[in-house]
Amino acid sequence: MTPSRHGKAAKVCGWRLRPNPLRRRSYFVEAWLLIAAWTLAVVAAVGTGAWTALAVERHVDAVRAGRHPVPAVLVEDARRTVGTSDGSDSYRATVRWRAADGTSRTGLAHVDSSSKAGSTTHVWLDARGRLVPTPPTAAQARLEGVVLAAWTAAGAGGAVLLIGRGMSGRLERRRLEQWEAEWARVGPRWGHKTG
């Protein structure tokens, strides 16, 4: 007996086009559900990652636009403060600068460790003339954007996959309940025939 010439053509992606009494409609639904979940997960991950990267870039641009550097003179030598989270030391000193209105202002600013009283440095001010931290550089902003984009992309994609897995699990439970109900109906009759 030779196999049908159409046997190979009738098989598409592992599914035969001919009806199979053991394959339920829920298998077909579950397959498409998982394909849709993976597709949506990729779209959600790429979309939220790109949106996050853009949001970080805009935020950093706004921060940089709202700050400007001005020259300042150290009133005292740089002094070591508590170490930073990366293990390096931080140095601060009181500095004096001229405000936009010409008045002299003083404040505490981060400076290089070798800075001495009387030397000049640059400090950053906001639109109101208040001393603010140095804004992130373009490389720091890019790194922050990439890290945050990766986290949000993973979170969004993972959430979609978890929802898809939950729906797939629900289909599986329903399928098992149907099998159990059918077996309860057919099993006793089948047992009598095998004697």
Image (cartoon, rainbow, N blue to C red):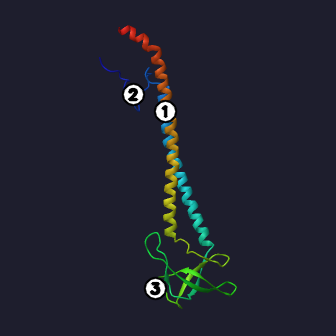
**Does the CB distance between marks 1 and 3 fall below 8 Å?**
no
**Secondary element type, mark 1:** helix
Given this view, does label 1 or label 2 mark the residue nearer the observer? Answer: 1
Residue annotated with mark 3: 114
Given this view, does label 2 or label 3 mark the residue nearer the observer? Answer: 3
- Report the number of discs: 3
* 36 vs 50: above or below: above
Q: Is residue 37 left or right of residue 98?
A: left
Three-letter code, disc 3: Ser
Which residue occupies 48% across, 34% down?
169
Which residue occupies 47% across, 30% down?
172
The spot of residue 54 in percent (x, y) is 56, 60
Which residue occupies 45% across, 18% down?
183
Q: How would you rate the neighbour count of disc 3 (Cα within 10 Å): few for under 14, some for 14-19, many for 20 or more?
A: few
Residue annotated with mark 1: 30
Disc 2/disc 3 C-alpha distance (Å) = 79 Å
* 146 vs 2: above or below: below
The spot of residue 77 in percent (x, y) is 51, 87
The quarter of the rendered structure image containing the N terminus is top left
**Does the CB distance between marks 1 and 2 fall below 8 Å?**
no
Three-letter code, disc 2: Ala
The spot of residue 142 in percent (x, y) is 50, 65
The spot of residue 70 in percent (x, y) is 59, 83
| Mark carried by residue 9 | 2
Which callout, 2 or 3, points at the residue further toward the start of the chain? 2
Q: How would you rate the neighbour count of disc 2 (Cα within 10 Å): few for under 14, some for 14-19, many for 20 or more?
A: few
Which residue occupies 51% across, 57% down?
149
